[in-house]
Image (cartoon, rainbow, N blue to C red):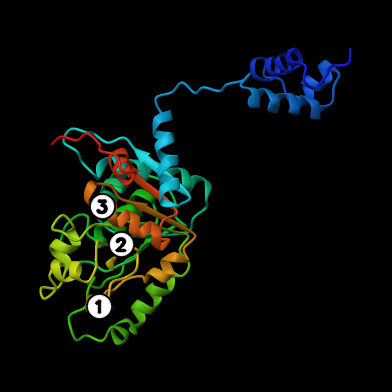
Amino acid sequence: MVREMHDDPFTAEVCWHYYVNGMTQAEIAKQLDVTRLRVNQAIQRAKTLGIVQVRIDSPFVARIELQEALRVELGIPRVQIAPARREDYDCHSGVGAALADYLIEKLRTRGWRSIGVSWGVTLEQTFRRLPAQPHPDLEIVSMLGGTMQGASFNSFSIVSGFAAALGAKYSLLAAPIFLSAGVDRTAFLAQEIFADHFAKFETLDAAILTASDVSERSFLVANGLPKEVAPQDLIRAGAIGDVLGHFLDADGAEIDHPICQRTIGVDLGTVLRTPEKILAAAGPHKVGIIRAASRRGLVDTLITDDVTAELLLGKRPGLSG
């Protein structure tokens, strides 16, 4: 019997074999004695007419939809969203766990040899959640200097913590995050030890970034700024937050302030050339800087939580604590 292309029983039969019986298009074409093209056309017709409707019954669907909406909103390639605890909200632990999962998978599939890391509580949460792994050919590279505070999420602790968890080598940028006023940055970085370290920035396979606002909630603002630089000075210059000690305005441009010439770490132009840029950041106070970093092109993958995602999309998340 010759079957017409617009014969709905034929379309239904094709779809039954394809979606219910799990047959390939080639197998269906052979069984029904038609071309594979006609089978494909029947499947497409079924989708168009609504004969076939796909429904994914899973609690994860809402988060996937949220990820896609945020990806489009920010104009970035990928978003991973962790579910936040709405009571006693913590902007670090969920994102740190999500970043750990992301890194485990990428280290398994990407063959990274060199990863640059920032600092902060989120990254401390990340390496504490990484299972011990053997990556002897991997090097963890600190991308900015540190502060004199001995916190466990300072850049010195972060780079060694990641290396210990991943069984990797590490390279420490043993310098302050900001030079003292009057110190010549070019002359300071001309020392051989810094030249060797800065050369490693050019060959990073991935950069793990954090960000924060310009307030006392930021470890950098609270403990790292030179005494003569007040947060209000940076805000008046247009700063809404920092990435790697570089203070950005709402459009992602570095502000015009003398502190910009005193930062010791990778420059943002080099970060932009890094193949994989991962920003791990969450919290209502980080919405502005996440947008700015995305606009600057510093984000290929955003790891955040659903509270922050909702805020970025203009929604009002329910929070307590």
x%, y% of residue 179?
Answer: 21, 78
Horizontal side of residue 23 vs 306, given as left or right: right
Q: What residue is shown at x 70% (from left), y 25% (from top)?
A: 45
Earlier-in-chain disc, 3 versus 1 = 1
Q: Disc 2 or disc 1, which is closer to the eye?
A: 2
Q: What residue is disc 2 on?
A: 250
x%, y% of residue 24?
Answer: 73, 24
x%, y% of residue 20?
Answer: 64, 15
Q: Residues within 10 Å of mark 3 (few under 14, many from 20)?
A: many
Say what amino acid the circle numbered 3 marks: Lys
Say what amino acid the circle numbered 2 marks: Ala
Give 53 or 148, whichever is nearer the viewer. 53
Res. 262 image quadrant: bottom left
Under tag 2, what secondary structure? loop
Res. 9 image quadrant: top right
**Taking 5 as reference, is 151 above or below it?**
below
**Taking 59 as reference, is 142 above or below it?**
below
Horizontal side of residue 132 vs 204, given as left or right: left
Earlier-in-chain disc, 3 versus 2 = 2
Q: What residue is shown at x 46% (from left), y 43% (from top)?
A: 105
Q: What residue is shown at x 11% (from left), y 76% (from top)?
A: 228
**Taking 129 as reference, is 221 above or below it?**
below
Asked if the residues shown at circle 3 and circle 1 are in contact, with their CB atoms under 8 angstroms apart, the answer is no
Disc 3 from disc 1: Cα separation: 24 Å
**Taking 158 as reference, is 18 above or below it?**
above
Q: Residues within 10 Å of mark 1 (few under 14, many from 20)?
A: many
Residue 262: mark = 1
Q: Quadrant of the N terminus?
A: top right
Horizontal side of residue 193 vs 89, given as left or right: right
Q: What residue is disc 3 on?
A: 286
